[in-house]
Each structure stands twice: as structure tokens, then as C-alpha cells.
Image: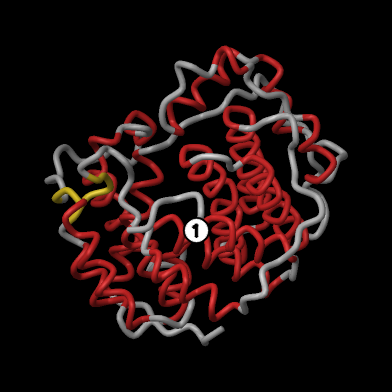
Amino acid sequence: MRAPSYASLDDALETLARYGIELKNGNSNHAPMVAEALCAMGRPDAVMPWIAGYRERMLPRPPAGARIDSRDWCAALGKRARFADWSVFFGDELQATHGVIRVGHAARGLADSETPLRLRELADALASWAATYQELPTNGHEANGGLTPREAITRVPTVPLDRRARAGNITTSLAMLDDLPEFAPVIGLIDTTGDLAPLIDELTEVFARVYLANAHDIRSTIAFIHGVTSPAALGNIAPLVGDRTARAALRYAWQSGCGLYACFGGETAMARDVVPPEADEDELVERAIAHGDEHVIKFTEACLHRHRLDPSPIYLAAVDHVRGMIPQR
């Protein structure tokens, strides 16, 4: 696969700065993440043409309103309407700390080069995180467990099928876990005391197997894509924060992936033996770009990145599978 190239990232971020975090259909705006993912796969030439085709789906960036008070910022968590306020808040914080804290896709763009546009994108990334904040039930079950993710995933309870009729998008589906008391102990099942990098490797690989075993329609496919891209993003963030923060983030990445499985999964938690496609990584990248869907592109980049760090045929099989589950753009 080609070496990463961020030649077009600032141009993309300048174009995208006028848009908010939601699309016209109410779903999330993935454009900044797709732009970074294409650059990470060495395809900066594909960024602006992709944005041109995506632009009609985006909504204008809302104006900022009341400032978020640093002494009472919790009151604004989880409020989508305050995205612009959060962006101003984090923009001020990043100007003070010179971009030390980086998240997800923004971390790699900043690692390549720190520019005002990439700092603003980091502020927007943090703002999106804060505005869409959602807690899953733990009921105090947060003590460290003794299982590996591969062992623990088989112990995750699932929401009964007859109770899933009221499920909607990922956010509303996860709300069903409030009525599933068996889910609360899940956060404490895994052992997070070992070396961090191998734990993130295993976590991502396990949820790629969960994806292959349970992605059977568009809705479940998109849900389980996020089960993989979230711990993959954690792999970008972990080296940039303290050990304690990284381990806490890993625990919550595990919990959120399990939450998706509990709401959308079936009887089989993980795919076992898989046959990878004959296509090489470059061909898989080209197929994702030709497909055009934002989830397919982001998922392809995340899986191939993790495959290079910790090779597993499950990643290549997942990348090959996803194109058939989401309609081509």
C-alpha cells in the first residue's frame, strides 16, 4: 500500500470548516475523517473529488451561542445543538496547550504537520465527541477483570429480539441497555493491566471478528463498523496521552463495542476461520475509493492499518465483505 501523504488535507479541512457535524438526513458527517483516511492510505488525490460528491449531503455549520464555562462544562455534554460552542471551547484550550492532546484521525494529521486548519479540526473532533457524549450503564462494575477480550466477548448478553423493535440508530439502540441489567458488569470483564499495544491489537481484531459474524444488513453493518473503527482510533490516541487515561479509554472502547454487539448481535459473537481475498492491499484501497461510501472508505483504512500493525486475515476478509453490504455511491 502507498505511503501516507497529507498533501491535500489542509485544502479539505478548509472546505469542510463551513459545515457542521450532521448531514441532511440526520446522520453524522464523516467527511473530515474520510479525508484523513484517504491521506493515510496514500491517496490525497482522491480527497477533493470525494468531498465534491459528498458536499450536497452536509449541513452548514451552526453559529456559536453561549460560551461553555470551564467550571461547569459537564452541563453541556451530550447536547448536539452545542457543537459550535464546544468547538470554540476546545479551540481556546488548544491554543493554550499548543495541540498536545490529539484524537482519532486528527492525531495523525497533526503528527504529519501542525497547521491552524488541523488544530481547528482537532477542536471540532473534540467538540463532536463532547456533543454526542452518551454513558452506558456500569452500576459500579468497573473493577479490573481477568479475561482477555477474546474470552470475554462470549459472556456479553444481548438484547432479546422482541425488544429490538423500538431500536433506531446507534444512539437510540444503545439506550436499550438501560433496561438490560445483565450488561452493566461487561465493562469490568477484561484485564487491562498488561502491555497496552497488544491489548489494543486484540480488541480491534476481536471486534473485526464480531463484525464478520454479525453484519448482515446495512444497519448492523454500520453499527459493527463503528465497533472496529473506535478501538482503531484509540490506537492513534493512546501514545499521545498518559497511561492511566489510555487504559480508561481502552475499557470504554471495549464497553462501547460490547454495547453494539448487545444491541445488534446474534448468537455467534465472533467469526472464527476466514478465507482472505486474493486482492492485495492496493487493490482493496482502489475498490473502496471506487465504491465511494464514507463508511467503506474509513473501515478499509482502519482495517488495513491494523493489519499492518498486527497481521490477521480477518481484516482483509472484513474489508472485502463490507463493499457488498452498503450500496455504492
| Quarter of the figure with the N terminus | bottom right
* Vertical side of 38 occupied by 124: above or below: above
Looking at the image, is 162 positioned above or below residue 35?
A: above
Q: Secondary structure at mark 1?
A: loop
Label 1, on which residue? 323
For image coordinates 56% across by 17% down, the residue present is 178
Give the crowd class for mark 1: few <14, some 14-19, many >=20 residues within 10 Å.
many
Decide if residue 59 is on the left or right side of residue 154: left
Q: Is residue 72 visible?
A: no
In screen coordinates, is 91 left or right of 148? left
Q: Position of residue 166 (x, y in %)?
A: 45, 16
Q: Which quadrant does the C terminus fall into?
A: bottom left
Identify the image quadrant of residue 64: top left
Closer to the camera, 287 or 42?
Answer: 287
| Residue at 74% across, 65% down | 313
Where residue 154 sits, quadrant-wise, is: top right
What kind of residue is marked 1? Answer: Arg
Against 234, residue 267 (above or below) is above
Front position in the image: 129 or 302: 302
> Residue visible at 19% across and 59% down?
55
Residue 245 in picture, x, y percent from top left: 61, 51
